[in-house]
C-alpha cells in the first residue's frame, strides 16, 4: 500500500521538538514547534500545490498541528 500526501509521519516533527525542548528549554521548544508547523505546511503545499487556502479545513489542520507541537514541547519542558 502506498501512502499519499494526506498521511503525515508526525514523529519526524515531534522528535526534534522533544529533543530541543529537553536540552534548551520551553521557549526553544515553542519556537521549534512554530518552525515545525510551517515546515509541515510547506511540505504539504509542495506535494499538493492545489491545496485550497480558501478552505477553513487547512487552517484547522495548521492550528491542530501547532497545538500538538506546543503541547508536546510543554510536556517535555515540565518533564526535564
Image (cartoon, rainbow, N blue to C red):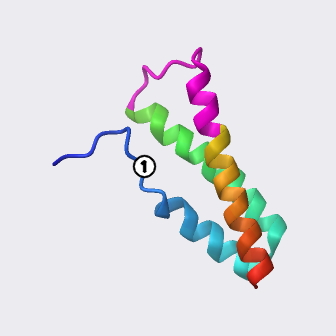
Q: Residue furthest bottom?
A: 80
- Left or right side of 7 for 36: right
Residue occupying the point 38% across, 35% down: 47
- Relative to 18, 21 lies left or right: right
The quarter of the displayed image where residue 4 is located? top left
What residue do we see at 83% from left, 65% from top?
27
- Give x and y (percent) for residue 79: 74, 82
Q: Which quadrant: the C terminus?
A: bottom right
Residue 16, picture quadrant: bottom right
Crowdedness of circle 1 by 10 Å Cα count: few (<14), some, many (20+)?
Answer: few
Image spot of residue 43 (x, y percent): 47, 41
Using the image as rendered, state which of residue 39 and residue 80 is in the foreground: 80
Above or below, 34 relative to 44: below
Q: Label 1: state its secondary structure.
A: loop
Which residue has dot 1 on it? 8
- x, y (%) of residue 72? 67, 65
Seen as rendered, the residue at the extreme top is 54
Looking at the picture, tell me which residue is in the foreground, 15 or 55. Answer: 55
Asked if 10 appears above or below 55 in the picture, the reply is below
Quadrant hosting residue 33: bottom right
Q: Residue at x 47, y 23 (%)?
A: 51
Membership of 26 in magenta stretch: no
* Residue 61 shown left or right of residue 34 in the figure: left
Q: Which residues are magenta?
A: 48-62
Provide residue 10's location: percent of width, then percent of height.
Answer: 48, 57
| Number of marks in picture | 1
Residue at coordinates 73% horizontally, 82% vertically from top-left? 23
Amino acid at each position: 500500500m502506498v501512502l499519499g500526501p494526506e498521511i503525515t509521519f508526525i514523529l519526524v516533527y515531534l522528535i526534534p521538538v522533544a529533543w530541543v525542548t529537553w536540552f534548551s528549554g520551553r521557549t526553544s521548544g515553542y519556537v521549534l514547534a512554530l518552525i515545525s508547523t510551517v515546515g509541515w505546511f510547506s511540505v504539504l503545499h509542495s506535494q499538493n500545490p492545489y491545496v485550497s487556502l480558501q478552505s477553513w479545513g487547512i487552517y484547522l489542520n495548521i492550528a491542530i498541528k501547532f497545538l500538538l507541537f506546543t503541547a508536546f514541547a510543554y510536556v517535555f519542558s515540565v518533564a526535564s
